[in-house]
Amino acid sequence: MTNSIYDALALISAVKSVFKDENGEKYETFLEVLKDFKAGRIDRRDVKYRVYELFKGHQDLIFGFNKFMPTQYEIKLPMDHDDNEQQGRQLETNDALAFLKKVKDVFQGKNREKYDEFLEILKDFKAQRIHTSIVVERVKEMFKGHTDLISGFNVFLPNTFKIQLHTGRRSETEDASAFIEKVKDVFEVKNKEKYDEFLEILKDSKAGRIDRSVVAERVKEMFEGHTDLILGFNAFLPNTLQIQLRTGEITWKWGKMKKLSENCEIPWDLLDIISRKLDFDDFFEFAGVCKNWREFHKIYWRNFLASQEPLLVQKSCHDKKCFNFMSIPDQRVYHSKMINHYWDFAYCGFSSGYMIMITQNNSFLLMNPFTRRKKIIHTSAFKVKFSYFAYHVLLAFCKDSEEFVFVALCNSSGSLHVYQSRNSCWVTYSTIGNPWKVVDFVVLYNTIYVVTDKAIIGVLDLNSANIKFLELKSTPAVTSSSHLRLVSCDGQLLVIHITSEEILNVYKIDFSTKNYVMLETLGDIALFYASGEYFYALSNPRMWGYETNSLHVINLSCTKCIVCVGDDNKLPEYIMHDTHKVPPREGGYLLDWCFKHLHYEVDYSPS
């Protein structure tokens, strides 16, 4: 949404300065709007409408905010009373039914009474039997735990009645606000003039009255002796303008001074060049040299993990046996020596940031190459088959906890095994005697959904060895040669169906009508397919350098990615998958797609 963290810092400073005396709540509401957008709870149209309401009478703030919005969503001034009324009517007619459908989807099934209760509340309000404040209190309680619904309902409420959300997530704007507060804490009592001067510098920069290089010079002089502030401000500056610290000294948090060797205090632009030559493991060692390098590592690593989706996992058999991670848009290769220790292990898949492999001692190894965390899950409940893609796997974490759930589907026997760390126990979901078998599973809204080879959709019950199947009114016509996979994307449950005629069909599960709905096009979604096993999906793929309405395919025996792009009214063509799944004996081959940002969470309680 923003052009850069630095610009966000300047905007936040201006908003806070304007509203600190006039209306402090508007500043907090503005941060909530940005957090809701970043979390995907509202779209740019909602942002435009809500920011306009907040910034009424402050054209400079509106013009400043327009810098961060696409042209079609910029707030046009003057936005007179008729425009406002028209937008309100558009909001009501276009969004009210969509929001009701969303509430119905969430509470369909065993919580249907909540949806009915919500309708009764709206009827009572329309008939003027209850006040707006009562509506807000009842809806707040009803939607507890569903921040997306609360955020959606807030769009229809006056500002004075909006329900406050506490997401626990930090955005770039929050980081900027936190840094301004830190500067204020340092200077407000002993040297308030410096704090006021700092705000003026940001305002002048935002207004284009001074160049960023001048900002860096003035801030360097202002923050002399406060290394923590300089390092913090560097986080908002481009590499070419990083403020260099004096060689040999750093002020640590506990007030002590430590001498550092001369080569530790390298400018951040040079550190950036060095870091690009390091593999994952050396980069962690790099962070342990000194505080300056740790600060750089923290910022660089955070940006790296957030700026590339997805990466390709490559395994090489030729000469050096190793794993690599490849960025197609950036044409870069990242190495990992740490994972190379497990080169001989059989690969199963990538889930929640972890590579999942099979050991030779009847165990599963879960390795996160980006954080270096490792989990080993032993089992005596069944014999683990040691071969490539012997299992279809899923790793999900419990909400607000380190507890996790690991699901492994044996591709040869069809047995479904589930491990829960809360009780260190395996449970087998038996399919013996059933005319179907589970072929895939995915997490949607903190629930694990499964699909069978008969295209039946079910919910995995984590408190009992049971699958609760949905009563769908229709299912696609499947045959013994059909290939079915599930994908969770943009709050939708998609079913991929590949027929024996090598035709790709994509369906959306409509929970309100309990039907399969065939899609004519993927729209703003790209599909990623790996080795006949895994389908992944990415919304807004152009943000990461991939085409919309496209299919990106890699086979275990190939060394390249094949791409097919559909048109506005047609899905991309299906590209034949790898039926043998046998890697080449020499050279490197593409193993899987690595989606670092997909961190699955499940919500369950002990039975």
Image (spheres, grey):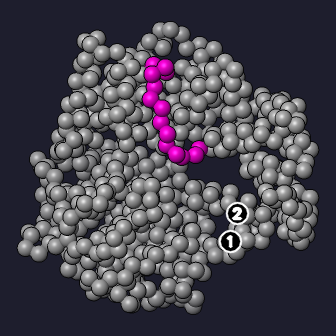
- Report whether residue 236 is seen: yes
Magenta span:
158-171
Residue at image coords 73%, 46%: 236
Residue 504, compared with residue 332, is above or below; it is: above
Residue 59, compared with residue 381, is above or below; it is: above
What's the magenta bit mostly, secondary-structure-wise? loop
- Counting every numbered tag in the picture gives 2
Going by the numbered disc 1, the residue's amino acid type is: Phe
Q: Quadrant of the C terminus?
A: bottom left
Going by the numbered disc 2, the residue's amino acid type is: His
Residue at image coords 52%, 42%: 38
Residue 87, compared with residue 190, is above or below; it is: above
The residue where tag 1 is placed is 283
Q: Which badge, 2 or 1, is on the more N-terminal residue?
A: 1
Instruction: Label 2, secondary structure: give it.
Output: helix
Residue at image coords 18%, 64%: 466
Q: Which mark is residue 297?
A: 2
Q: Do tag 2 and tag 1 residues touch (Cβ < 8 Å)?
A: yes
